[in-house]
Amino acid sequence: MSLLARLLCQFHKPLMLYGYTDPATKSFQKYVRMSSTVTIVQAGKLSIGDHVWIWHHSILDATGGLEIGEGCQIGAWVGLFTHGSNNSIRLLGRRFVDIPNAERQGYIRSPIKIGAYTFISSGAVVLPGVTIGKGCVIGPHCLVMSDVPDHAVIVTPPGRVAGNTLQTDARLLDKVDFTATYYDLQLIPQLRQMMNEVRAAEKK
């Protein structure tokens, strides 16, 4: 997001901005759409794939490294945090502010990686060190504290795996042919096999 865009946003209601230059690859992601109210910390450590959509008032903390895969959608008021002082404030007490960031004992810095075409609902929080797989759905207000496998559906309370998006996609593929647009074409045979197994089970 450019400095001009940020200045404009100070005097304008929230709006969606198009395009993003990825600092990691130096490439311009033409189809990224990001709210003018998104807060980015350490932009140089943030990598965003193309076709990503990020809604209002979300926080992208890239202090420890943050990678958002192609096609992800992130709702409003989402927090992606790659650092934290929750332990070091106790360990260092009043000396916390006097010690250089890199030397603070107990200070957490760990990257977050979000796989392609994952949807993160409004109000969700992802903590340092978490990897979220591709094709996942993270429900509203989830606190994600551990890794999430590909295609998982996470709901709250508490945040837990409640399903698998491949099961949903297999049922949809049985009704609508989306093989030309599906985000991971290598999964199409698996989806067809899953649906064949469902039909076979129904005949028994």
Image (spheres, grey):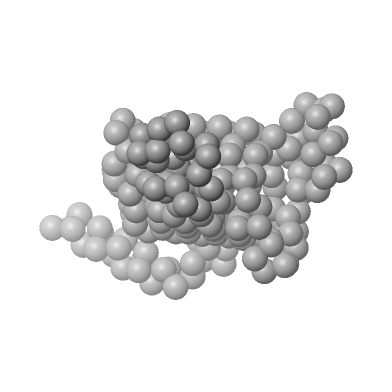
Q: Residue at x 76, y 44 (%)?
A: 17
Q: What residue lies at 58% left-to-right and 45% top-to-bottom?
A: 60
- Viewer-proximal residue among 134 and 105: 105
Residue 9 shown left or right of residue 108 in the figure: right
Picture quadrant where residue 175 is located: bottom left
Residue 128: tell me if it is visible.
Answer: no
| Count of numbered circles on the image | 0
Q: Is residue 110 left or right of residue 149?
A: right
Q: Is residue 97 above or below residue 165?
A: above
Location of residue 86 with respect to 33 vertically, above or below = above
Residue in the foreground of this view, choosing between 25 and 128: 128
Residue 87 location in percent, x, y? 36, 39
- x, y percentage for residue 55? 63, 38
Q: Is residue 60 left or right of residue 134?
A: right
> Quarter of the image holding residue 197?
bottom left
- Which residue occupies 76% across, 48% down? 1
The picture quadrant where one finds residue 16 is top right
Which residue appears at 49% of the width and 32% of the height?
A: 123
Q: Is residue 1 visible?
A: yes
x, y percent for residue 164: 33, 51
In the rendered image of this protein, does residue 39 appear above or below residue 146?
above
Find the residue positioned furthest to the left. 204
The C terminus lies in which quarter of the figure? Answer: bottom left
Residue 124, given in percent of the width and then of the height, sits at: 46, 36
